[in-house]
Amino acid sequence: MTRTISVLLLVSLAVAACHDRAPSDPIVLDGSSTAFPLAEAVAHEFMKANKGTTVTVTFSGTGTGFVKFCRGQLDIANASRPITVEEQKTCESANVSFVELPVAHDAITIIVNSANTWASTITVPELRTLWDVAAEKKITT
């Protein structure tokens, strides 16, 4: 857990530096529901190691987290994907800079139901195309 505590501390300091201000009191994290359990565990350990410091962790989704972060409402935005170019521009226009710090990668297992009648094969390049940012809201099956 020490590494994780260090990561939260470094991220808090980095984000505070990006905002040109100290972290809020409490330190506020929001964003990805996928990252929520890890962020909550880290916050708990961080508060144990830093008596008197409060960290609040909620989840409203990665996109909403980035919106709040770019508005200056968060110290840390938890995300399950990289920040988009549009979100970067929103942060820039609000004079909010950031440091992207990957802390984990999740795995996806592709399972086809035995009753399936249409998907006989799918390749890794096809999966990449399906989940590419450019495919969002364009490729749905």
Image (cartoon, rainbow, N blue to C red):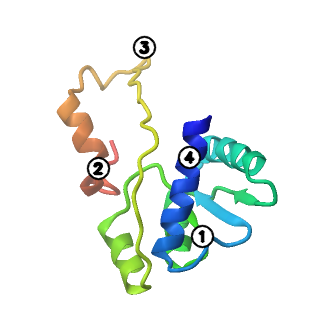
Task: Identify the residue under disc 1.
Answer: 74
Q: What amino acid is found at the position of numbered circle 1 in the picture?
A: Leu
Mark 1 falls on what kind of element?
Answer: loop
Residue 2 shown left or right of residue 128 in the figure:
right
Of the two numbered discs 2 and 3 in the rendering, the one whose residue sits closer to the viewer: 2
Task: Identify the residue under disc 3.
Answer: 114
Find the distance from the CA under tag 2 to the CA under tag 3. 23 Å
Q: Is residue 54 above or below residue 73?
A: above
Find the distance from the CA under tag 4 to the CA under tag 3. 45 Å
Q: What amino acid is found at the position of numbered circle 3 in the picture?
A: Ser
**Where's residue 116, x and y in %?**
39, 21
Residue 15 shown left or right of residue 91 in the figure:
right
Task: Identify the residue under disc 2.
Answer: 139
Task: Answer with the quarter of the image where residue 4 lies.
Answer: top right
Mark 3 falls on what kind of element?
Answer: loop
Which residue: 56% across, 61% down? 12
Task: Answer with the quarter of the image where residue 28 lies.
Answer: bottom right
Tell which circle, 2 or 1, labels the residue nearer the N-terminal end: 1
Which residue: 59% across, 48% down? 33
Quarter in which the C terminus is drawn? top left
How many C-alpha atoms fall within 10 Å of the one at disc 1: few (<14), some, or many (≥20)? many
Mark 2 falls on what kind of element?
Answer: loop
Tell which circle, 3 or 1, labels the residue nearer the N-terminal end: 1
**Where's residue 15, x and y in %?**
50, 67
Of the two numbered discs 4 and 3 in the rendering, the one whose residue sits closer to the viewer: 4
Find the distance from the CA under tag 1 to the CA under tag 4. 19 Å
Find the distance from the CA under tag 2 to the CA under tag 4. 40 Å
Find the distance from the CA under tag 3 to the CA under tag 1. 45 Å
